[in-house]
Structure formats: structure tokens, C-alpha cells
């Protein structure tokens, strides 16, 4: 789950960065292109809604990473067996 969360975080961050970098010229209609390929033509409301969707996907990835890290901390053994020759001998 940790790897899947990191993958979601990286993918949404990279996609958002590529879209912003490749579409700096604005207008009433935006032609979204990533790596030289035109994906869609969107108006301002569609761009806003796609930003919300990317934010939800980013938060899902962040939540997956956080829950996997918390699960790993809870499952780690709290006490260890005493070492030979250590305290308690």
C-alpha cells in the first residue's frame, strides 16, 4: 500500500507539473497538451473540476502512504528478547 500511495503521489504531481508547464498560454478555451500530444480542449470550469479531481487523487495517495506508515509502526515488535550477558542476568 505504501508503494501504491507513493506512485499515486508521484503520478499526480508529475501530471500536474507537465500540464501547467505545457499550457501557460491561457484563453477562454484551453487545449491541454502533455508531452506534445493534445489531450482535450476544456473551458475554465472543466479545468477547475479536473484540478479538484487531481487533488482528490493526490490526497488518496497521501492517505495510503500515511496509513501504511502507521500500520508499519504498530506492527513492529515493542519489546525485544534480552541479549545474553545483558541486564537481568
Image (spheres, rainbow, N blue to C red):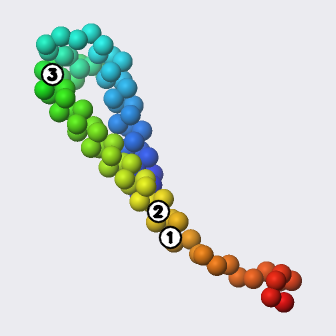
Cβ–Cβ below 8 Å for labels 1 and 2? yes
* Up-down relation of residue 62 to residue 27 (above or below): below
Tell whether 48 sits left or right of 5: left
The residue indicated by pointer 1 is: 74
**Dot 2: element:** helix
**Dot 3: element:** helix
Quarter containing the C terminus? bottom right
**Dot 1: element:** helix
The percent coordinates of residue 5 (x first, y second) are: 40, 50
* Up-down relation of residue 72 to residue 78 (above or below): above
* Up-down relation of residue 15 to residue 44 (above or below): below
Residue at 37 percent across and 53 percent down: it is 63
Q: Is residue 4 visible?
A: no
Q: Is residue 32 visible?
A: yes
The residue indicated by pointer 3 is: 44
Quarter location, residue 34: top left
Of callouts 3 and 2, the N-terminal one? 3
Compute the Cα span from label 1 to label 3: 45 Å
Of callouts 1 and 3, the N-terminal one? 3
Quarter location, residue 86: bottom right
Compute the Cα span from label 3 to label 2: 39 Å
Cβ–Cβ below 8 Å for labels 1 and 3? no
The residue indicated by pointer 2 is: 70
Quarter location, residue 17: top left
Residue most extreme to the right: 85
Compute the Cα span from label 1 to label 2: 6 Å
Amino acid at each position: 500500500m505504501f508503494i501504491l500511495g507513493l506512485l499515486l503521489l508521484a503520478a499526480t504531481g508529475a501530471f500536474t507539473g507537465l500540464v501547467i508547464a505545457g499550457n501557460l498560454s491561457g484563453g477562454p478555451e484551453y487545449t491541454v497538451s502533455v508531452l506534445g500530444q493534445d489531450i482535450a480542449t476544456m473551458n475554465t470550469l472543466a479545468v477547475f473540476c479536473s484540478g479538484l479531481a487531481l487533488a482528490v487523487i493526490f490526497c488518496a495517495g497521501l492517505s495510503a502512504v500515511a496509513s501504511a506508515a502507521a500500520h508499519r509502526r504498530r506492527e513492529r515488535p515493542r519489546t525485544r528478547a534480552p541479549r545474553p550477558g545483558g541486564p537481568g542476568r
